[in-house]
């Protein structure tokens, strides 16, 4: 009896060790892929139905034999086939918006008796480095008759009255850092090469005061984003210097909320990743909230205290994250992972066709109900059947469990044509933060992180609308000091475009 018990214990330990070995092998493979492999998630199925294949089995090929051989002679004849020469598209046409510097070149030959017929135009794309220059205001002063006083021309309003920087320079400093990810100390070195030595503290003060100037504009954008009834939400970390933590940085978070329908985005800085931040920001929000499945958002699924008749928040999840889990399980169970990814690929093909044919929201919903719902129903049943046949802690088991737990919210998008199949729109808005922190590494304080979130919000909205951010910011800084506060929303990027 003791031998049987000992055998069962050893068998149980063996099974646990096997599960542990599989989990460690998967972690090792994932780390190796992160360090040495490609980061893309492109998936090409082994067999593509649309490709032609010969319907010949291996048995038929093996049974085939040569029974007779004959010498075949043939005569090659040429046929005149009309072929059209390939037309080279030519050199890229340069944008008409660029300034043209016209240089007229006359022939060196004697032109006596010649009549001009045309100009042969050759365009060369040229560049001049950015120029620092001085805008000097000379205000004429006049003495009034009988020594009654002095009359002097009035200075125009400036963004920062006590700073020597104009709106163009302030805009360029901000764009260089938050769009092109050039830290302030590198900008300082570039100014010094141009003969202007500016202190680092001066640059930080200019950025800080610029943010203070456009704060009302940021608050207006925040209000508009949160008035939507469909938001994408995600979060990303940022290192922050904190006086309370000597020798190390604090890990803060940007909570990002995007209205992909109106193409607006709002970055809210919080010192932690707890649910307190989104609870406060979204306390009055109702509608669809699309997230990546992070448990911090679960509090909105059963939010207490809603007024009678108020719809509350409907959580929907991201199909791209579910797909990513199966992609990471390819090394663990290629057969199951490949099947899941092929089915999800069908869903994305439906979305691509809807996008390419520019359908309305109602038309998109009809297509999804007709084509996507059967795929989702079949795939939902399949993941449940397969889950019981896999190890829960294996990569494929985790992928299946992730989808099963969230399947209803992963499928919710088919009920409204305005909704997206995934949370990729907000992830695209977060990319500048990821690029920026590789260059400037950290924010100097919690307040600096909040200011950065303000600029990421406004400039990110610019980029979503295809607006050149420097042009917009320079114009805003030129007029905002004299602009009525109750009409501040007129200066938002999407209204500036109109």
Image (cartoon, grey):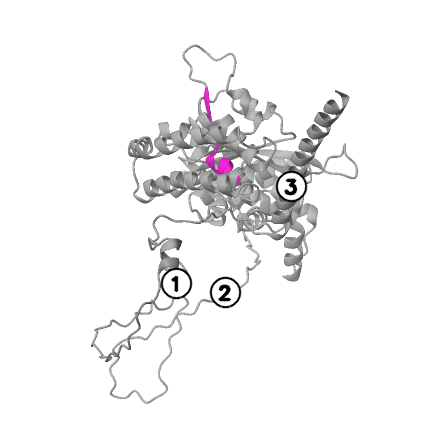
Q: Look at mark 3 in the image and give the residue it sits on.
A: 27
Residues at marks 2 and 1, CA–CA distance in whole angstroms: 13 Å
Instruction: Kindly state the secondary structure of the residue where label 3 is placed.
Output: helix
Q: Secondary structure at mark 1?
A: loop
Would you identify the image quadrant in which residue 193 lies?
bottom right
Q: Residues within 10 Å of mark 2 (few under 14, many from 20)?
A: few
How many residues crowd around disc 1 within 10 Å: few (fewer than 14), some, or many (20 or more)?
few
| Left or right, 448 with reference to 379 | right
Image location (x, y in percent) of residue 356: 32, 45
Q: Which corner quadrant holds the C terminus?
A: top left
- Callout 1 touching callout 3 (CB < 8 Å): no
Q: Position of residue 367 (x, y in %)?
A: 30, 34
Q: Residue at x 33, y 43 (%)?
A: 353
Question: Upstream in the sequence, badge 2 or badge 1?
Answer: 1
Q: Where residue 47 appears, x then y in whole percent?
A: 41, 49
Q: Which mark is residue 94?
A: 1
Relative height, residue 242 to residue 125 (above, below): above
Residue at 35% x, 40% y is 350
Front-most of 172 and 26?
26
Q: Nearer the viewer, residue 391 or 451?
A: 391
* Pair 1/3: label in front: 3
Left/right of residue 249 with respect to residue 44 in the rendered view? right
Region rendered in magenta: 313-324
Depth check, mark 2 against mark 1: the one in front is: 1
Instruction: Give left or right: position of 446 versus 428.
Output: right
**Tag 3 or tag 1, which sits nearer the N-term?**
3
Labels 3, 2: front one: 3
Q: Taking 231 as reference, is 115 left or right?
A: left
For the question of whether residue 192 can be seen, the reply is yes
Q: Quadrant of the N terminus?
A: top right
């Amino acid at each position: 009896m003791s031998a049987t018990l000992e055998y069962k214990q050893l068998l149980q330990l063996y099974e646990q060790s096997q599960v542990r070995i599989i989990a460690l092998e998967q972690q090792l493979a994932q780390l190796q892929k992160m360090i040495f492999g490609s980061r893309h998630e492109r998936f090409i199925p082994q067999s593509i139905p649309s490709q032609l294949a010969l319907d010949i089995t291996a048995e038929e090929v093996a049974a085939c034999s040569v029974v007779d051989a004959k010498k075949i002679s043939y005569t090659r004849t040429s046929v005149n086939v009309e072929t059209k020469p390939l037309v080279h598209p030519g050199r890229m046409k340069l944008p008409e918006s660029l300034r043209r510097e016209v240089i007229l070149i006359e022939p060196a030959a004697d032109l006596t008796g010649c009549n001009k017929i045309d100009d042969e135009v050759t365009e060369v794309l040229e560049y001049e480095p950015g120029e620092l220059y001085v805008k000097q205001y000379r205000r004429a002063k006049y003495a009034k008759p009988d020594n009654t006083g002095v009359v002097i021309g009035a200075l125009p309003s400036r963004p920062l009255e006590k700073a020597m920087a104009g709106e163009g320079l302030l805009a360029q400093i901000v764009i260089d850092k938050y769009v092109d990810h050039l830290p302030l100390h590198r900008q300082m070195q570039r100014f010094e090469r141009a003969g202007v030595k500016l202190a680092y503290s001066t640059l930080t003060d200019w950025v800080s005061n610029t943010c203070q100037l456009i704060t009302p504009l940021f608050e207006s954008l925040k209000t508009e984003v949160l008035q939507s009834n469909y938001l994408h939400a995600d979060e990303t970390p940022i290192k922050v210097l904190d006086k309370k933590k000597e020798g190390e940085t604090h890990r803060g978070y940007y909570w990002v909320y995007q209205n992909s329908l109106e193409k607006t985005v709002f970055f809210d800085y919080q010192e932690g990743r707890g649910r307190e931040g989104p609870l406060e920001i979204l306390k009055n929000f109702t509608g669809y909230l699309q997230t990546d499945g992070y448990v911090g958002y679960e509090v909105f699924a059963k939010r207490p205290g809603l007024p009678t008749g108020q719809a509350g928040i409907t959580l929907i999840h991201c199909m791209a994250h579910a797909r990513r889990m199966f992609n990471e399980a390819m090394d663990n169970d290629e057969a199951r992972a490949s099947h899941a990814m092929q089915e999800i690929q069908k869903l994305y093909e439906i979305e691509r066709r809807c996008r390419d044919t520019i359908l309305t929201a109602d038309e998109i919903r009809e297509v999804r109900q007709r084509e996507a719902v059967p795929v989702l129903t079949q795939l939902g049943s399949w993941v449940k059947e397969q889950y019981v046949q896999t190890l829960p802690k294996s990569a494929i088991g985790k992928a299946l469990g992730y989808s099963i737990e969230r399947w209803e919210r992963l499928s919710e998008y088919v009920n409204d044509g305005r909704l997206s199949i995934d949370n990729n729109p907000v992830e695209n808005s977060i990319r500048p933060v990821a690029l920026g922190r590789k260059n400037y590494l950290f924010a100097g304080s919690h307040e600096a992180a909040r200011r950065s979130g303000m600029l990421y919000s406004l400039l990110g909205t610019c980029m979503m609308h295809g607006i050149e951010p420097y042009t917009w910011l320079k114009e805003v800084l030129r007029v905002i000091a004299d602009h009525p506060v109750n009409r501040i929303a007129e200066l938002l990027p999407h209204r500036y475009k109109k």
